[in-house]
Amino acid sequence: VVKLGLDMPKLFETLDDFYQSSFVSIEQLNLNSATELINLIKQTKDNPNSLSNRAKNKILYSLFFNDSTRTRFSTETAWLKLGGQIVSQVGTNGSSLNKGETMYHTLATYASYLPDIIAIRCNEANLPLKATTWFPSISWVNCGDASNEHPTQAILDLFTISEVISDISKLKIAFVGDIKHGRTVRSLSKLLNLFGAQMYFVAPVSLQNQKEYELDKISYQYVDIENLIDIVQEVDIIYATRPQIERMNDSDKQKYQNGVYQITNQIMNSTRAKLLHPLPIDSSVFPEIHPEVDSHPQALYFQQMENGLYARMAILSLIVSGNQVFTNNNQTNKNFKSY
Ligand code: CP
């Protein structure tokens, strides 16, 4: 597969293909490997200590050039729980990037010291993919590149959905918020596309982008956010995202700031749907989910956040030590249908 003239790293037909590979795009997965990975994360969550030496004597470079709470801490904690060691870069402070060095020279420097894995978050779309072609001997993990992708987030999102919905092919999900710029929606919708889930993209007109998504198999439609209250009755999962009001037109911005589209307990009480959000929720202007919803029984976003640890333990373990983790353990996610 070629993207932007760059070869995509190895595609994952099975979990064996993760070994010493890079994970920069959800497009590397197929239905089989995605299903196997969800089952592996279930095993990891049930028995996290069984992975405790998988990264022993291995080094992770954790490069978070952009802000992160969950992805950085869950990635670094996952690695430490695997027994590995970490060198971190947070932002650009202390880096020669601040002296005008190019990102290419910076990454060349990191790669030359032979870490086993480099996890990277950045505000340049496709930089992780470029890094795999520049320095193919390193295993790169994309922890979010601008508006492009957030593949490990999509995996933990799917795992969280699998904890409540056994047959993803029958899933109905409403993505609510910034459909146009949200990397989590982009990655998760591609992943759910493999399963044939039915998706609704619910956004104000200025945050929809019908050409952005190359979704072939699925049943999907765009819905104006004015119809949010109707659509939540239809779905199993509401996946809310930060609306990024700075990107809205004035009319849409006014409606958001008036709280017209905020998810409240009243909305949650009108539906059986579970509520996910990759977090953070932006509380600075007008939170897209009212704080009262945090304790609503259908709000799963804290469970989702916690699952990031197990998802990243499983992914990093596969990359650094291969698919030998649970070879003698036939336990799988009994609730999750095989495809
Ligand atoms: N979901 C997510 O990527 O959160 P952080 O930005 O806190 O890492």
Image: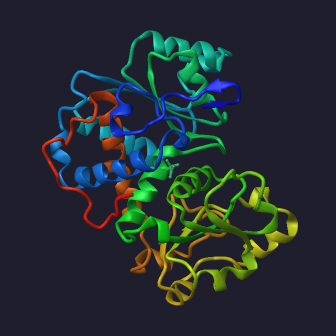
Residue at far left of view:
328
**Location of residue 301 (image quadrant):** bottom left
Whether residue 88 is visible: no
Quarter in which the N terminus is drawn: top right
Residue 252 x, y percent position in the rendering = 81, 70
Residue 317 x, y percent position in the rendering = 29, 35
Residue 135 x, y percent position in the rendering = 52, 16
Residue at figure coordinates x 66%, y 66% from the top left = 220
Q: Residue 100, relative to residue 296: is it above or below?
A: above
**Location of residue 108 (image quadrant):** top right
Residue at figure coordinates x 21%, y 26% from the top left = 56
Residue at far top of view:
112
Quarter in which the C terminus is drawn: bottom left
* Colour mapping: rainbow
Q: Residue 300, relative to residue 58: is it above or below?
A: below
Residue at figure coordinates x 34%, y 39% from the top left = 15
> In this rendering, would 239 be left or right of 327?
right
Residue 58 x, y percent position in the rendering = 28, 22
The total of numbered circles placed on residues is 0
> In this rendering, would 321 be left or right of 205?
left
Q: Residue 165, relative to residue 32: is it above or below?
A: below
> In this rendering, would 231 be left or right of 118?
right
Whether residue 180 is visible: yes
* Observer-nearest of 297 and 327: 327
* Observer-nearest of 134 and 309: 134
